[in-house]
Image (cartoon, rainbow, N blue to C red):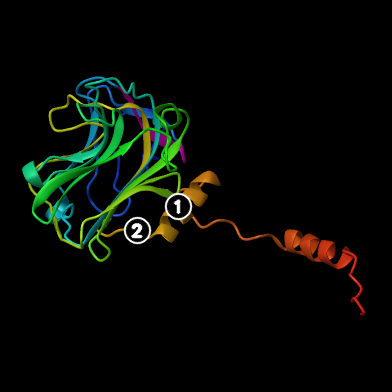
Amino acid sequence: MSYWNFDESDTGTGTAFDQEDSNDGVFEGAAIRATGLIGAGAASFTNTNGDGVNVGAGTSNNFSTTSGITIEALIDSNWSGAFGDYDEIFRKEDGSNRMLFSFQHDNGPQGPVLSFGLNVGGAYGELDMALDGVGGRPTLAQITTGVHHVVATYDMVTGAKSIWYDGANVHTIDLGGLSIASGGGADALIGNDHTALEPFSGIIDEVAFYSHALSAAEISLHYDRVRAGNNYFTPLPEPSGALLSLVAMTLLSLPRRRPHRG
């Protein structure tokens, strides 16, 4: 996996080190660090062409995967949702083997969407989650207000291609368990695409890429940790001894119900 927490600093444009592998990121254009959504730093984008964090093509082609994938991020988005506006969270453009996770509004009937693009079974396709507030899906206003945890997954074992929002699976389709076609020489970017013309507007933090699908339990746990102010991988604190003692004393002080005698 690769994981960029941007915690080297809360200012400047120094290297965004991959905390798990060697796909270090380079700030491009007007992209710059800001105070972290979690931790010290994050990446800030102003919807300016050329903005982005370039994390390379993948050392030893390690952005290539066949049986599963997860793209995970925290976002504080200012996306307009306007027709023709595209804001990339993560994109690697390898032709028909591209992978993307982005906000889009093109000529589709759903209007503004959060899209997850991937080649499965030899055919590239995009899962578009309408921002309509139906079935647990957020509205455009909701997803562009405050900090949100967004995740895209595909699992060849189950065939499920899914988009998750704040810990919950809110949009999924079954692709029948086909393998992924991915990898190539194109650089992967956080906050833009290969043309540098689809810049993000807002803040992106805690970006993680996995060559397998996280489970529902793992995604829920990551969201719980974020809500507690921690990164995905910091365990939630155990209850203190004092708290456990207080709970025990409270339980002992509760009145006991007398057994009913008929």
Mark 2 crowd level (few <14, some 14–19, many ≥20, 10 Å Cα): many
State the image coordinates of residue 154 (x, y, percent, origin top left).
Answer: 26, 55
Q: Residue at x 29, y 26 (%)?
A: 31
How many numbered marks are there? 2
Q: Residue furthest front?
A: 262
Q: Is residue 194 left or right of residue 231?
A: left
Residue 176 position within the rendered picture, expressed as x and y whole percent measured from the top left: 20, 61
SS state under label 1: helix
Q: What secondary structure is marked by label 2? A: loop
Name the amino acid type tagged 1.
Answer: His
| Location of residue 2 in the rendering, given as x and y in whole percent from the top left corner | 28, 51
Q: Quadrant of the N terminus?
A: bottom left
- The amino acid type found where label 2 is placed reads Leu
- The residue shown at (89%, 69%) is 256
Can you identify the residue that label 1 sits on?
222
Taking the magenta stretch, the answer to whether it contains residue 220 is no
The quadrant holding residue 148 is: top left
Q: Determine whether 163 is above or below 142 in the image.
A: below
Quarter residue 211 falls in: bottom left
Q: Position of residue 187 (x, y in %)?
A: 14, 40
Q: Check disc 2 and report the residue beneath it.
A: 214
Front-most of residues 258 and 188 = 258
The answer to whether the residues at label 2 and label 1 have Cβ atoms under 8 Å apart is yes
Residue range corresponding to the magenta coloring: 37-46
Q: CA distance from mark 2 to mark 1?
A: 10 Å
